[in-house]
Amino acid sequence: MSDLVSNYKILKEHNLIVEYHTGFLDADSFINFKKNISLDPLFLPSLNYFVHLKKVTFSTNLEDIDKYINFLEINSKVFGIRRVALITDTPNQVVSTTMFKMLQQNKAQSVEIFSTNESALEWLNSKLNKKEILDVLATLMLS
């Protein structure tokens, strides 16, 4: 059983999925979470991702990162062409997300790592402002 708690909200009008994670992240729990998102009736393969990881401790190694990358490659038609903004805060988060970014070969997916919500939203070309994203994240924290 995983200690990862994950919630998301699909904002079709912003072409965006906002994810909020807390706890210990391992490959299997993250893969299962991604599978659940893809079953949402609002899900589209072209949606970009805003992934808030600032409350996560990665319980991963290189093998786990490869497992997640393989999952994405096998399911590339499901997850489509998109931008993925990973929002991090600690060295543990930066190391794991950087390894993922360096190892992933999916050219349909562009990944960047950010320390602020604003810079991530700007890179995603989102019209959401700071207050709006904080409101969404607050809602997801309480879910």
Image (spheres, grey):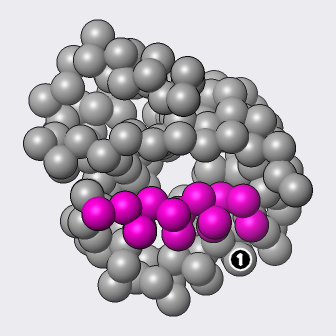
- Residue bearing mark 1: 67
Left or right, 57 with reference to 117: right
**Residue at (70% x, 75% y) in the render:** 66
36 relative position to 3: left or right: left
Residue 115 location in percent, x, y?
A: 51, 26
In terms of image quadrants, where is residue 13? top left
Along the horizontal axis of the image, is 52 left or right of 53?
A: left
Which region is colored magenta? 28-41
Residue at 29 percent across and 53 percent down: it is: 48
**Residue 137 screen position, x and y as percent:** 44, 24
Q: Residue furthest top?
A: 131
In the rendered image, the vertical position of residue 132 relative to residue 128, given as above or below? above
Element marked by disc 1 = helix
Q: Who is closer to the viewer here, 108 or 138?
A: 138
Whether 31 is among the magenta residues is yes
Q: Magenta includes 40?
A: yes
Residue 113 visible in the current orientation: no
